[in-house]
Amino acid sequence: MLTRIVSGLRYLGKGMRLMVGMPEYSTYVAHMHHAHPDRPVMSYEEFFRERQEARYGGNGKVTRCC
Amino acid sequence: MNTFIRKFGWFAFAATGAFALAVVALNRGEPVGALWIVVATVCVFTIGYRFYSRFIASKVLGLDPTRMTPAYKHNDGLDYVPTNKYVLFGHHFAAIAGAGPLVGPILAAQMGYLPSMLWLLAGVVLAGAVQDFIVLFISTRRDGRSLGDLIKSEMGQLPGMIALFGTFFIMLVLLAVLALIVVKALAESPWGTFTVAATIPIALFMGVYARYIRPGSIVEVSLIGFVLLILSIVGGQYVQEIPSLAALFTLTGEQLTWLLIGYGFIASVMPVWLLLAPRDYLSTFLKIGTVVSLAIGVLIISPELKMPALTQFVDGSGPVWSGSLFPFLFITVACGAISGFHSLISSGTTPKMIRNERDARFIGYGAMLMESFVAIMALVAASTIEPGVYFAMNSPSAIIGTTAESAAQTISQWGFHVTPEMITQTARDVGEHTVISRTGGAPTLAVGMAQILSDVLGGQTMMAFWYHFAILFEALFILTAVDAGTRAGRFMLQDLLGSFIPFMKRTDSITANLIATSVCVAGWGYFLYQGVVDPLGGINTLWPLFGISNQMLAGIALVLCSCVLFKMKQDRFAWVTILPAIWVFVCTLTAAWQKIFDANPRIGFLAHANKYKEAVTEGTVLAPAKSIGQMQQVIFNDYINASLAALFMLVLISMLAFGIRTALRARALGTPTAREAPFELLPVEVVSRT
């Protein structure tokens, strides 16, 4: 039961972060290790800034509705 | 036996829905509980999802669970990430839900709750959700490309450019009408203005906190921000009670307009992490939280609907907005039934994160049903208000005057019982000086929500708090939209102008940047100002223009969907998008035509211009103008509005022509011509897991 609640909360947290355009950092790190072990991995802070810039920094993307 | 139970279960479900609909629709005179509306809605949506969306998924689109998705193909852990479908549903829903589905049904309630409700239910199941779902599917099969790109590759370069051009103007009208809603809600309201103003320093603090103090702690910083917001609502009451402070925050509509224009400009050139991002966190979470609590509130107390099922205003003589039920109701309800804007979201970030093509049904179709549910909640909130008070709040002062006595007298003549005391009591309850002519929908929704939420929590004494909470929540996400929309509009403009003036394309150039931002802000600022000084309230002009532009985009998206179905050689199922497209075209073109040419000056822009022209030749001055020069300005505005409506018609008709050309070409060929990304299998370990 407790593990269920914990995993439910974890999904809720993931969902909330993705609602504002912030994907999972651990998924990114896992992906980099798996697919590009030769390339540098951004720290969480760099990752956070990169994602913020990507969501709001423009190039004409519409990220929300009326 | 099992299949029998299953079939019988669905039959019982359908019967419940039909019964609830009958209670809502056929009831005359006796008050109806909102719970019936909720039951009818849930039944209709569940059946629509279970049967119609499944039909579209399997027969029309042929979703293939083994097919590669962009999230795996281009996986970079950033934009392209395979994502759990429930998490992605939240992301998609948060992106499509905004002010539109809340405001539209409130304005439409002047015709009674029944027409809006029926259109919301039928529109979303057969049109709105279909559009969202199919665009999401199309984009997912094409590496998650954007609507403009999809139109370019499936229909041609020119239609793609036309669609982008149309989108830019939608953006301007949208920002103007959203800003107008904020101005109407905050004018002469020190409490509201203070709370909304306080969000700026709160957001700045959050921005610094999430960048330097505790980098990347989104949820934590949002909680801190939320507490500060609540404090600012409480503080607003004290501001209102201290005369010197109250005077500082009591602003007229025109003052607020200039402040908003200035804010829009400054905010959209500031670094995103400082103001836009933290504001977005607050508004997104607050939006979801408020919508959920409103739904819970409605379920718990099942408030009685006081608005009649139908009012006499179906003939088009209504005070809130003018025009008859067809076509204007379908334009006014807007986003909750079908919203063209969603096609931008469905071809934006969501398709890049879909784990399996099969999820497109739940996310595309399902999230739109949810949005429509929000619209139904807004309709319920508006209908639980005493109709007399509703009309006092939503009729322009040119019609009902500026005092409670004159308003009560006029509205009573329409046949809605209301006394001056009822109007002033409502204002006192929510802690405002007046509620008369608080047009724009936000204050009405706030009163409705305050009634429902205070019934659940806090009682009468909490009503003013809930009212200002609702105003804050709407203003917050509208201001976020103004900021983000100005940025998006700037890039669109640079992209469009860049085709002719190469210098403008350089997004790194500060000059090009500032020029494009100024043009954008001036564009929506112009429409906003025009709306604020309009004695008929501005909503009467701007909301139909917004509705028309949004439906225009829906028409474009549905044409694209139909073309793709023809190109996939699914001709026999193309009616799935053609029928809603025809309806959208008929409504939008009729509405635009009437907005331009109708002989009634309250509806037709040209008739309105002529009325002022005649007055000018006679040398008389009509309100709101105070001089002949201002009269000329009103005439000029009418011509601008008429041209804009004509432009939307032209865009639609040309897209229709391009669509028919594409469809005919596809039919002439014997093989599928849809330009999907080549078929690849999903990685085996993924297929076996899902």
Image (spheres, coloured by chain):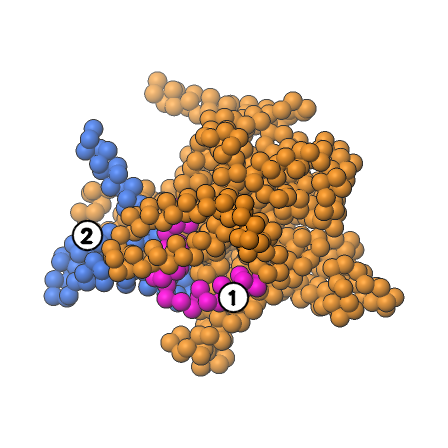
Chain colours: A blue, B orange
Residue B166 counted in the magenta span: no
Look at the image and tell me whether residue B377 can be seen: no
Residue B33 spot, x, y in % from top left = 56, 25
| Image quadrant in which you'd find residue B361 | top left
Residue B340 is left or right of residue B678, and the answer is right
Q: In this view, which residue lies farthest toward the right?
A: B618
Quadrant where the C terminus of chain B sits is top left
In the picture, which quadrant includes the N terminus of chain B? top left
Chain of the residue where label 2 is placed in the rendered structure: A
Check disc 2 and give the amino acid type: Ser
Q: Say few, some or many: other residues with alpha carbon within 10 Å of mark 2 (under 14 / 14 to 19 / 20 or more).
A: few
Is residue B60 rendered to the left or right of residue B617? left
Q: Position of residue B3 (x, y in %)?
A: 36, 23
Residue tagged 2: A26
Query: Of B440 and B202, which appears nearest the observer?
Result: B202
Which residue in the protein does label 1 denote?
Answer: B262
